[in-house]
Image (cartoon, rainbow, N blue to C red):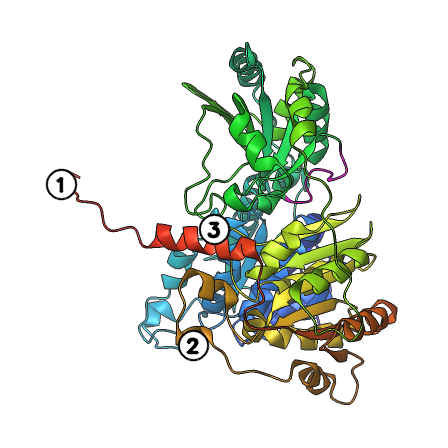
Amino acid sequence: MAVQQPGKFTVGDYLAERLAQVGIRHHFVVPGDYNLILLDKLQAHPDLKEVGCANELNCSLAAEGYARANGVSACVVTYSVGAISAFNGTGSAYAENLPLILISGSPNTNDPSQYHILHHTLGHPDYTYQYEMAKKITCCAVAVPRAIDAPRLIDRAIRAAILARKPCYIEIPTNLAGATCVRPGPISAVMDPITSDKNALEAAAKCAAEYLDGKLKPVILVGPKAGRAGAERELLQFAEAMGCAVALQPAAKGMFPEDHKQFVGIFWGQVSSDAADAMVHWADAMICVGAVFNDYSTVGWTAVPNIPLMTVDMDHVTFPGAHFSRVRMSEFLSHLATQVTFNDTTMIEYKRLKPDPPHVHTAEREEALSRKEISRQVQEMLTDKTSLFVDTGDSWFNGIQLKLPPGAKFEIEMQWGHIGWSIPAAFGYALRHPDRHTIVLVGDGSFQVTAQEVSQMVRYKVPITILLINNRGYTIEVEIHDGSYNKIKNWDYALLVQAFNSTDGHAKGLLANTAGELADAIKMAESHKEGPTLIECTIDQDDCSKELITWGHYVAAANARPPRNMSVQE
């Protein structure tokens, strides 16, 4: 580590102090020669812990997971070969509304003007291309040209990320990280929130009253932005004041208590749980709180509500024929809770439609392992201290069907949908929440994309339980569009963990071919605290949920729509 000169405060020190002040305690890094001095400065801060990652894709996804747990995160990479790889996880953070601070070292400030061709670049002397690319996937991108500009630009980027709940990008040249810089001013200049405009808030509440006037069957539909806006407490307050049915979109699972009497299930069109689909289509008023209607959440555009909607977004509210900007979701819901009239008509109807609890078959110990038996045993693992990550694929559908006990957390990446996301994301999350038991449901195809980050779980002794469902292929792709490309090379996943252990690790790799073997493996995982436990669960290639099959057919149909006949004017 470089020795800091007494009394000298640098650009790197400024950035380190701001990261610590906004609540970051772990920063995720991959070293490269353009960021080494910066890494020294961050490493020297007493409130920051450096976490090395296997590669920049995993680094950015680990930071994405940390942002889910902490509210904000930092990923530090080198120029071009590092940052462009990290753009993938940054895209996830943008799509999933997470304030990830992507920090990249960059070439010496003297090189562009001297037209030097540098390593790790595209081979021409215009080095603005990475900054220009970053603008497309962040809410604010800054490139620091001089040390004197660093405080203003760093503060601008971090504040933008925190307010927008989106990633930002900060580029610091290698010869400026150690350059002298002023000390930061009060952190309130960066952190203080923007509150609702009082007049807009009152007007939106009045419009809400008009929207609900005369409606007999209101339903609240909760989407993933409710959690990102930090409005879960206010959502509960508003829902109880309304007294009506509350359905959740799949990406919002866990953002409203599933044991609450007003919870009516996950609304996911033809693959909905409980009676959510019937309740949503029966409603004559729909209050959408943080909802996201995309092709996946609407099952290929077949499950879009067909009535005029009241839409509460993170910072604005929209009605048929009206829009109100600068209305914060939490403040609007809290205010509206004092204005609405209690109406439990939809709950009366739900009692008539609510399905009976399904009969759950318990497999004999010697029975071959199945998807349903895995789900049954995972259900028994869930407690108020569980954080469950479900990766893209059938894990989505199996996870959605599980019942979350009070206090359990659920993490899904449905907008970006990057296979393999769960492995590094769970690692980042678990570092922030060592008090919780992090469980991952991931398919074999997804695991192969980011498997290296299990080695970091070993390195940092993070006791994550990974249930790897091995059905030898990309099952979700098979159900959308089958082909030979959906078959993958099988690995010995349980044995792979031993390679990550080397001579000093304590991870466990276990194989479960039967129900009894899975039960024994889970028992070992729950008592193992010195590192991760990976349980390879082998099931038949055709053993997937009927929900995935149904969903896949509709999404395939949406993907296959022919081009529109567009006129010249269009």
Residue 218: x and y in percent read: 58, 21
> Mark 3 to mark 2: distance in Å?
22 Å
| Residue tagged 2 | 120
Residue placed most toward the observer, 43 or 208: 208
Residue placed most toward the observer, 30 or 321: 321
Q: Residues within 10 Å of mark 3 (few under 14, many from 20)?
A: many
First to last magenta residue range: 253-260
Depth-wise, is mark 3 or mark 1 nearer the camera?
A: 1
> Mark 3 to mark 1: distance in Å?
34 Å
| Residue tagged 3 | 138
Residue 15 visible to the viewer = no
Mark earlier in primary sequence (3, 2): 2
Res 444 → quadrant: bottom right
| Residue tagged 1 | 567
Q: Mark 1 is on which residue type? A: Ser
Q: Which mark is residue 240?
A: none
**Image height of 160 relative to 110, above or below:** above
Q: Mark 3 is on which residue type? A: Thr
Mark earlier in primary sequence (1, 2): 2
**Image height of 316 relative to 21, above or below:** above
Residue 213 visible to the viewer = yes
